[in-house]
């Protein structure tokens, strides 16, 4: 690959801007989300609005609803939009609310439930309306997910922190992505105990490729209760440590923090960032 990482990220930024166009728990509030244009908030339904008090327990399902208006993979039986609790992967690890979806294959679940693909999506944008559970998937991704559904897997797909739900989306930061994915899996397994089985493969493309690697790295110490069997990461656009002689200057730390992080292309450093997978 001859193209520089900076060129790749610049191209990703252009795609980001252009690509994005579009028993129940407590019901969604009726008060619409107040748009916050600098962070891309707003434009989604009240389903995505967090409750007034966010539960401290992570992996807690707040509400679900059947998805009616999105084109699903051909072999999908149905899909459920989910809203659940997680941790912020930026700054203090405060409770946050994250959205996502669960896609079920056709047929009767096998004994113990369907094994799970945790789909970690690629770049869609940074605004709430770019959340896959709201806008749907590109045809390529639907075809890809269709393959896994045909093979007998259910799909649990987090939107990631700040997509769909209020607040900035920490783009390309593996800790928020990993927390979102792992806690989404916890919430889904508890919500659908007879339909989903705790046997999980992490699969991601592009932004999601880095997210899948980060999730796989964090899972053993953060979520040992989840049985992660493997990681499939393609088109990875990320790294976990700054090399000794980087080909481009790293972004300043201020660009990875609110309110600047929505436009940042960097990985959030932490005490473990120098470790390898």
Image (spheres, helix red, strand yellow):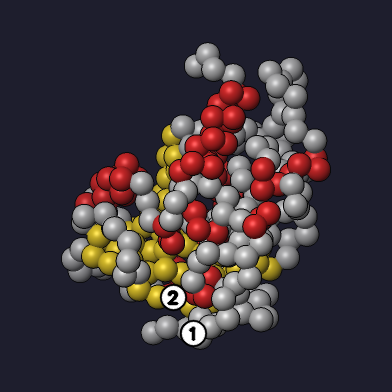
Judge left or right: residue 48 versus residue 258. Answer: left
Q: Which residue is mark 1?
A: 27
Residue 108 appears left or right of 255: left
Q: Quadrant of the C terminus?
A: top right
Q: Which residue is mark 2?
A: 64
Residues at marks 1 and 2, CA–CA distance in whole angstroms: 9 Å
Q: Are marks 1 and 2 in contact (CB under 8 Å)?
A: no
Residue 164 versus residue 105: which sits nearer the camera? 164
Badge 1: how crowded within 10 Å, few (<14), some, or many (20+)? few
Comparing 97 with 131, the one in front is 131
Q: Which residue is depicted at the point 46% across and 69% down?
A: 82
> Which residue is found at the position 44% from the left and 34% from the top?
234
Residue 69 visible from this viewpoint: yes
Residue 186 placement (x, y as % from top left): 50, 66
The answer to which quarter of the image holds residue 194 is bottom left
Residue 86 sits above or below residue 13 on the image: below
Question: Residue at the spot x=68%, y=40% of the render?
Answer: 264
Q: Callout 2: 10 Å neighbours few (<14), some, many (20+)?
A: many
Mark in front: 1 vs 2: 1
Residue drawn at point x = 50 percent, y = 66 percent: 44
Image height check: is 39 above or below 265? below
Callout 1: SS:
loop
């Amino acid at each position: 690959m001859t193209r520089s990482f900076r060129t790749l990220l610049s191209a990703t930024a252009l795609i980001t801007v252009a690509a994005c166009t579009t028993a129940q728990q407590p019901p969604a509030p009726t008060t619409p989300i107040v748009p916050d244009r600098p962070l891309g908030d707003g434009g989604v339904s009240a389903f995505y609005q967090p409750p007034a008090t966010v539960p401290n327990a992570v992996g807690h399902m707040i509400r679900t609803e059947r998805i009616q208006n999105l084109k699903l993979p051909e072999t999908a039986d149905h899909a459920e939009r989910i809203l659940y609790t997680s941790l912020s992967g930026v700054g203090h690890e405060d409770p946050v609310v994250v959205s996502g979806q669960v896609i079920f294959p056709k047929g009767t679940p096998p004994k113990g439930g369907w094994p799970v693909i945790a789909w970690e999506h690629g770049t869609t944008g940074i605004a709430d309306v770019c959340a896959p559970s709201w806008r749907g998937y590109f045809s390529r991704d639907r075809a890809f997910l269709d393959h896994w559904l045909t093979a007998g897997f259910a799909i649990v797909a987090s939107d990631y922190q700040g997509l769909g739900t209020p607040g900035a989306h920490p783009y390309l930061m593996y800790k928020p992505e990993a927390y979102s994915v792992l806690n989404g899996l916890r919430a889904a397994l508890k919500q659908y105990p007879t339909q989903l089985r705790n046997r999980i493969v992490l699969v991601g493309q592009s932004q999601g490729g880095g997210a899948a690697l980060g999730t796989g790295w964090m899972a053993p110490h953060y979520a040992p209760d989840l049985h992660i069997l493997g990681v499939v990461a393609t088109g990875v656009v990320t790294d976990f440590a700054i090399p000794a002689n980087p080909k481009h200057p790293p972004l300043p730390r201020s660009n990875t923090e609110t309110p600047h992080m929505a436009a940042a292309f960097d990985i959030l450093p932490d005490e473990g960032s120098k470790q390898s997978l």
